[in-house]
Amino acid sequence: MKNEAPDYPDYMDVKEASEVVDELRGRTMHMIWQYKAWRQRRSAVLMKSEHLLMEDDLLRTQINETFRLYKVVQGEYTHLHRRCLEGLRQKTATRFVPEEERKQCA
């Protein structure tokens, strides 16, 4: 069994994950703003209607699901970003040390 170096993500993988996180954050915030505006347009008297209560529950459920997805994707992005930085540190740490010296230190 060979002692292989760990596989680190490259910059473009991290960049794409960052864009997905930004998109989901924007979508979640937009949904929350729309929900708040929708709630303000409805009076307390109208919110007692069964139809509006169901719509309110549906909107809150959609926002919660989108927010949960955002948190999962953000966590994966953070992990990917840390792994990429770790890979960069490994590359720069071993770049200037001759291989013979690296073997002696290991």
Image: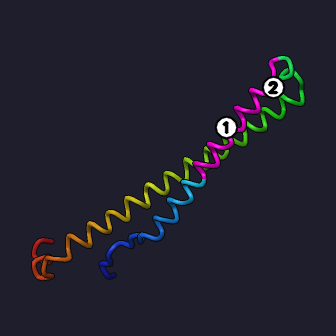
Q: Residue at x 67, y 37 (%)?
A: 33
Which secondary structure, mark 1? helix
For the residue pair 106 and 52, the one nearer the viewer reads as: 52
Q: Residue at x 48, y 69 (%)?
A: 13
Residue 41 placement: quadrant: top right
The amino acid at mark 1 is Trp
Which secondary structure, mark 2? loop
Q: Quick check: 32 left or right of 41?
A: left
Q: Which residue is mark 2?
A: 42
Q: What is the residue that sits farthest to the top in this orientation? A: 45
Viewport quadrant of the C terminus: bottom left
Q: Which comes before the other along the chain, label 2 or label 1?
A: 1
State the image coordinates of residue 54 (x, y, percent, origin top left).
84, 32
Q: Which residue is mark 1?
A: 33
Residue 44 placement: quadrant: top right
Magenta span contains residue 64 = no
Residue 6 placement: quadrant: bottom left
Q: Is residue 42 above or below residue 6?
A: above
The amino acid at mark 2 is Arg
Rounded to the nearest angstrom, the CA distance separating label 2 from label 1 is 14 Å
The residue carrying pointer 2 sits among few (fewer than 14), some (14 to 19) or many (20 or more) residues within 10 Å by Cα, namely few
Q: Quick check: 104 left or right of 25?
A: left
The residue carrying pointer 1 sits among few (fewer than 14), some (14 to 19) or many (20 or more) residues within 10 Å by Cα, namely few
State the image coordinates of residue 38 (x, y, percent, origin top left).
76, 32
Which contiguous range is marked in magenta?
24-44
Q: Is residue 44 above or below residue 103?
A: above
Q: Residue at x 15, y 82 (%)?
A: 99
Q: Residue at x 76, y 38 (%)?
A: 59
State the image coordinates of residue 83 (x, y, percent, origin top left).
38, 62
